[in-house]
Amino acid sequence: MSERDVVVRIDGLHKTFGHLEVVRGVDMEVRQGEVVVIFGRSGSGKSTLLRCVNFIEDPTEGSIEVAGVKLGGGHRTKRKRAKIRQLRLKVGMVFQQFNLFPNMTVLENVMAAPRCAGRGKEAVIRERARAMLDQVGLSEKEKEHPIRLSGGQQQRVAIARALAMDPEVMLFDEPTSALDPELTGEVLAVMKNLATEMHMTMMVVTHEMGFAREVADRMCFFHEGAILEEGPPSQVVSSPAEPETKQFLDAVL
């Protein structure tokens, strides 16, 4: 595997809030087209890790590189803020909550970020937004407002919105945790399609072990701010090496 195949490289990542160290020296590489599922107990630092990749949270120490844009931890300078904007153009993120603009139609929500970033003429942005809505199975909802959609549909719009920026990597932070069980499947189906049909590079924080077993190339068990165990789903789920991993899986399966 050549150097250029690595889309995300995390080196020696630490994140501290006051005296609390939430992420402790994480090293990770994610290659092009790879789906990495990160799982573990609440408060183990999984979501903080993702938020550092997108610099929603500034790492305290270490470095993050996404598609050739590399940034270190510590305070933001004017130059660093410019590089963060560069890095964010390469990253799509989907949160637990959908964070759609209620005053905009579905289509306008998907067009908002490319418009703001000046990604081409209006007609080109509109065409791509419609293509992304088609990708998530919501073409017929483009004129609706978010309040008229189910939670599952809103999350699919949020995925389309992230895809509209043509990211190098998609980050999913527990994308189904706010959904009723019957709506979870439709979101996971879209994510599966992104992995298998579009070969999208993805980092996914989730407790959906069925999805992980079926779609992930690699699973990382996060424990007390660090990766305690990682490997292919067949190994991690069926025969975990660490007692903490086994205990967690016994509880969720």
Image (tube, rainbow, N blue to C red):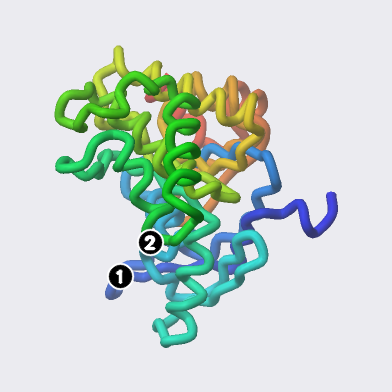
Please tell me the numbered disc located at residue 22: 2
Vertical relation: 149 (above or below) 175: above
Across and down, in percent, residue 181 comes to 29, 16
Residue 224 visible in rendering: no
| Quadrant hosting residue 55 | bottom left
Vertical relation: 42 (above or below) 22: above
Measure the C-alpha gap from mark 1 to mark 2.
7 Å
Q: Residue at x 45, y 53 (%)?
A: 50
Please tell me the numbered disc located at residue 17: 1
* Amino acid type for the residue under numbered disc 2: Val
Question: Farthest residue toward the top?
Answer: 182
SS for tag 1? strand
Q: Residue at x 56, y 48 (%)?
A: 169
Marks 1/2 in contact by CB < 8 Å: the verdict is: yes
Q: Residue at x 15, y 42 (%)?
A: 103
141 or 83, which lies in front? 141
The answer to whether residue 168 is left or right of residue 81 is right
